[in-house]
Amino acid sequence: MTDIESDFVVVGGGIVGLSTAMQLGLRFPGRKVVLVEKEPELATHQTGHNSGVIHAGVYYAPGSLKARFCRAGSEATFAFAERHGIATRRPGKLIVATSRIEMERLATLEERCRRNGLSVERIDGAGLSELEPNVAGLGALRVAESGIVDYREVAQAMARDIEASGGRLITGTRLTGILETPGEIVAETNKGSIRASCLIACAGLQADRIARMAGLDADFAIVPFRGEYFRLASRNDRIVDHLIYPVPDPDLPFLGVHLTPMIGGYVTIGPNAVLSLAREGYGPRAFNGSDLGDMVRFAGFWRTLAGNWRAGISELASSWSRSRYLALCRRYAPSLELDDMLPHPPGIRAQAVLRDGTLVHDFLLRQTRRSLHVCNAPSPAATAAIPIGEHIVKSLPPDLF
C-alpha cells in the first residue's frame, strides 16, 4: 500500500466499522472512504465469534443508547438481511425462571420489555412445558421479536456495499500511529499512511490502545472476557424451538448460559464469562504478555476484581468443569448429558472498565477534533450495528469536510 489521500478513514473491520463505512458512503456520496483492518479478513474477532442472536432489547434501561440502538437495529438487521438474501429466523425468546427470586426478577424484566416497546407475554410453568417440552421452569417471559442470523454474512454484505459505493477496504494492515493537525489527520500504518479529514476508530478489543494513540486521556481500559460455547450433538438439533435464556443476575453485565438454535440448523449452549489472558487468542491456553501487562497495570481492573471476585470464581469453576457448566444448562434443560456437549469456537468480549472499577454497560464514544472513537460497543452491538453507524456519522462535526 502506498500513501493514500481520503476524506474518511475507518479503523476496524468488524461489523460496527463496516456499518460506519457503509453509512459514510450513503451520506456522503462521492467522498473517499477507506477502511483499514489489521487482520487478513474482515469480521475476525467479536463479529465472527458471537452467538448470532438478533436481540430485541429486553434487558436495556429504557432511554439508554443500548435500548434505542437495539430496537432500531433489530428491524434494520432483518431488513438488511432480506435485501441481501441472507437467511434469518425469528423464533422468539423464552427467559426461563427456575427459582422464586428469578420469578420476582421476571416482573422487572416484563416491565422493562413493555417500556422498550416489545411484545412480551408471561408464561406459567404449564404453558412453558407446552411450548417447549424439553425445558423446565417455574415460568417464563416470551419475547416474539428475538431472532438469529450469521453476522459474518451480514458483515460481508456490508463490505460489498462499501465497495459498490466507491469505498476501499484494506486488510492485513496494522495502525501504528495517529497524527492530528488542524488541517488533517494521518493514520500511519505498517504499509504506508492514510491522510484524511476525519478518522473513526471502531477497534473493539483494541479500542483503548487506539484512543491513546490519538492522544485521548484513556480513563478506561479494555478487559477481555472469554465466552466459551459448546455445540449440542446432532440428536439435539430440535431440542428447542425458541432461544432459551436464564433470568440474568442484574448485578452482572452478562446474560448467562443459554440455548441458541443457530442458522446452520444446530444448537449451541453458552457462553460463560471468564477473564481472558489474551485479547485475541482463542485457544484454551491463549496468553499474551502485553495484554496481561496492560490489564494488571490498570487500577480499575483490580477494583473490578475486588467487587466481582465471587462471580469470577464461579465462572472460572464452570470453565474448568464441564459437569458444572452442564449443571447451569440443566437448570432449565434437564435432559442434557455430558456427551451432548461438543467443542465449539469461543468468543472474546471487549469490556470497557473505568478507573474506579465500574464496568461500562452502555456505548462509550470519545472524540478529538478530527477523530471519533467507539470505546465501548457492548452487546447488542452486532444487532445495533446499522443505527450505531448512522449515529456515528451524524455525530461528526460538519465543518471538517
Image (spheres, rainbow, N blue to C red):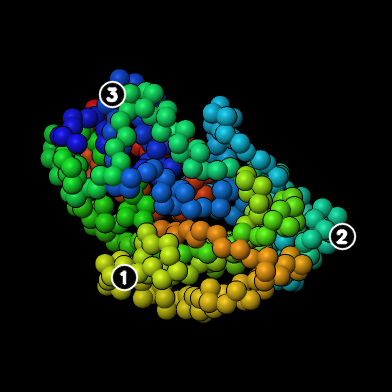
Which mark sits nearer the N-terminus, 1 or 3? 3
Q: Viewer-nearest of labels 1 and 3?
A: 1
Q: Residue at x 24, y 48 (%)?
A: 174
Residue that mark 1 sits on:
292
The residue that appears at 41% across and 52% down in the rendered structure is 45
Residue 268 — which label? none
Distance between the alpha carbons at the discs numbered 2 and 3: 59 Å
Going by the numbered disc 2, the residue's amino acid type is: Ala
Could you say whether the residue bearing mark 3 is in a helix, strand or loop?
A: loop
Question: What is the CA distance from the residue labelled 1 to the residue labelled 2?
Answer: 49 Å
Of the pair 281 and 274, the residue shown nearer to us:
281
Q: Which residue is mark 3?
A: 31
Asked whether 300 or 325 is in front, the reply is 325
Q: What residue do we see at 19% from left, 45% from top?
A: 189
Q: Tell me the quadrant of the picture where the N terminus can be found.
A: top left
Location of residue 41 in the rendering, given as x and y in whole percent from the top left corner: 37, 44
| Above/below status of 96 relative to 65 | below
Label 1, residues with CA under 10 Å away: few <14, some 14-19, many ≥20: some
Q: Is residue 280 above or below residue 356?
A: above
Q: Inspect the image, locate mark 1, and give the three-letter code of the amino acid beneath it.
A: Leu
